[in-house]
Image: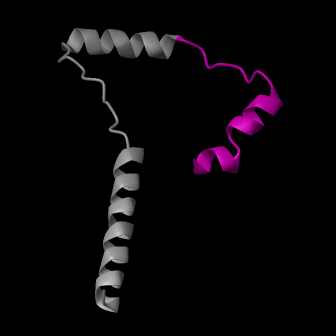
């Protein structure tokens, strides 16, 4: 067994391992399919959203952790 065969075998094993890891970890994101809405239905939805008042901040501790840099990174 020559050095070239050994190196080739190692390279092939590493590449296969990398491909296997990368393909298994990624998941396809599913998007919600929206049905085509009429103009009246769109206006009704917009009015419904606009009529709700803005939510009040519940607690400073919760909002600070939810906006933390560590969570935004992931």
Q: Residue at x 76, y 21 (%)?
A: 58
Q: Nearer the viewer, residue 19 or 52?
A: 19
Q: Which residues are magenta?
A: 52-74
- Name which quarter of the figure residue 22 lies in: bottom left
Front residue of this view, candidates 29 and 49: 29
Residue in front for this viewpoint, 48 or 6: 6
Q: Position of residue 24 (x, y in %)?
A: 37, 46
Q: Is residue 62 left or right of residue 51?
A: right
Picture residue at 57% right of the left edge, 47% below the top: 74
Point out the residue furthest to the bottom here. 3
Q: Indicate whether residue 62 is drawn in magenta.
A: yes
Q: Is residue 33 left or right of residue 21?
A: left
Image coords of residue 26 (percent x, y)? 38, 45
Residue 19 in the image: above or below residue 25: below
User: How many labels, in total?
Assistant: 0
At 68% from the left and 41% from the top, the residue drawn is 67
- The quadrant of the picture occupied by the N terminus is bottom left
- Colouring convention used in this rendered image of the protein: one colour
38 lies above or below 26: above
Residue 33 horizontal/vertical position (percent): 24, 23
Q: Relative to 12, does residue 16 appear above or below in the rendering?
A: above
Quarter-wise, where is residue 16 in the image? bottom left
Toward the viewer: 28 or 33?
28
In this rendering, the answer to whether 51 lies above or below 8 is above
Quarter of the image for residue 3 reads bottom left
Magenta stretch holds residue 65: yes
Instruction: Say which residue appears at 30% left-offset and 29% top-offset.
Output: 31
């Amino acid at each position: 067994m020559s050095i070239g065969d050994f190196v080739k075998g190692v390279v092939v094993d590493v590449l296969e391992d990398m491909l296997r890891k990368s393909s298994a970890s990624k998941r396809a994101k599913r998007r919600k399919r929206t049905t085509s809405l009429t103009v009246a239905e769109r206006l009704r939805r917009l009015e419904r959203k606009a009529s709700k008042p803005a939510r009040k901040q519940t607690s400073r501790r919760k909002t600070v952790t939810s906006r933390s840099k560590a969570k935004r990174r992931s």
